[in-house]
Image (cartoon, helix red, strand yellow):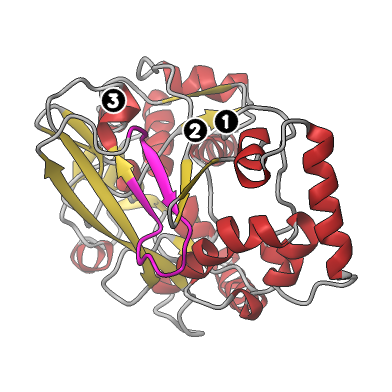
Amino acid sequence: MHYDYLVVGAGLFGAVFAFEASKRGKKCLVLDRRSHVAGNIYTNDVDGIRVHQYGAHIFHTKNRMLWDYINQFAEFNQYINSPVAVYHDELYNLPFNMNTFSRMWNVKTPAEARAIIQEQISDLSIKDPENLEEQALSLVGHDIYEKLIKGYTEKQWGRDCRELPAFIIKRIPLRFTYDNNYFNDRYQGIPVGGYTPIVEKMLKDSVVLLDTDYFDFTRNHEGIADKTVFTGMMDEYFHFTFGALQYRTVKFETEKLDCDNFQGNAVVNYTAGDVPYTRIIEHKHFEFGTQPYTIISREYPKEWQPGDEPYYPINNETNNALFAKYRKLADQQKNVVFGGRLGSYQYYDMDQVIDAALSLTQTEFA
């Protein structure tokens, strides 16, 4: 059979594009090398608890149009992301707000908190930050940096903060209100039943082949579609002609525990450098579960190697320059378009993925 589009990747970007193309009468064949759809937002039902297999995903957006778009596929609950940070035997609320400052310095008013932060910044006398450490110190002072930023960041990136470029942290939001809502976005929540059913609905009118590698498949099915939408790694598509782009990845350790409530919150960050994982996710709390047992996942960031799942692009000057070379090759492709997190070498929130996929459909079907 011949198709209008071969969509490589059954994640959110590919699924949105396939859904929109199918609505317009286009025939889509969707491939994914994994054994399931939904990519990194895949949620797996384990004994009645929806497990975020590839890390926590909380949908949030300021854009009413995107909120209405995703809500056509699922009902969303009223989950508000309010993570907690653990530093040794101390516990802090995130994002950095008056609850954080009150716990750290025993202050009660915004004026007191501002004065302490400003005094610490002034004492450091950092005029032109040369690395991430200096940039962070110049924004929040040493207490917040040492307890809540340094260890977590070094685990996340696998590098000393003094070896990371300053531009990684352009700003650090400080809230002088007692508000633990992590996002400022008007709309947020978790889909009732998880994300996987959303993607399944998007792909209902497409042909989907799982456990299928694009490169192997196209060797035996050349010309099967008029056009390809590729959401995988752009450097891999071009056979690493200029070398491999760098990524960070995550190893998950997931276990079921014989207790009804392990940590009292869905997301708890561990910010000390001597704790090997960055956070623990307790999945049932995303949907207010009442099961007599619970499931947790510890997250261990590490350097990406071939065979790993690439998660976070390392958008430093070297990698961005390398990606620009691949982008030039991509722009020369007549019947292939690239999109999604990997195809753009850019970290996206879910609403940004949907927006980018809808923008592509507008271009394709104008």
Q: Position of residue 258 (x, y in %)?
A: 9, 37
Q: Identify the residue shown where x is 51% and y is 66%.
A: 151
**Looking at the image, residue 351 lies above or below residue 328:** above
The answer to whether the residues at label 2 and label 1 have Cβ atoms under 8 Å apart is: yes
Q: Quadrant of the C terminus?
A: top right
Residue 10 seen in the figure: no
Residue stretch rendered in magenta on the structure: 264-280
Q: Is residue 89 magenta?
A: no
Q: Quadrant of residue 185?
A: top right
Residue nearest the viewer, comparing 65 with 160: 160
Could you tell which of marks 3 and 2 lies nearer the N-terminus? 2
Judging from the image, what secondary structure is the residue with disc 2 in?
loop
- Left or right: 321 in relation to 286: right
Q: Which mark is residue 131?
A: none
Crowding at dot 3, Cα within 10 Å, few <14 / some 14-19 / many 20+, comes out as: some
Judging from the image, what secondary structure is the residue with disc 1 in?
loop
Disc 3 designates what residue?
A: 201
Judging from the image, what secondary structure is the residue with disc 3 in?
helix
Q: Which mark is residue 180?
A: 1
**Magenta residues, dominant SS class:** loop
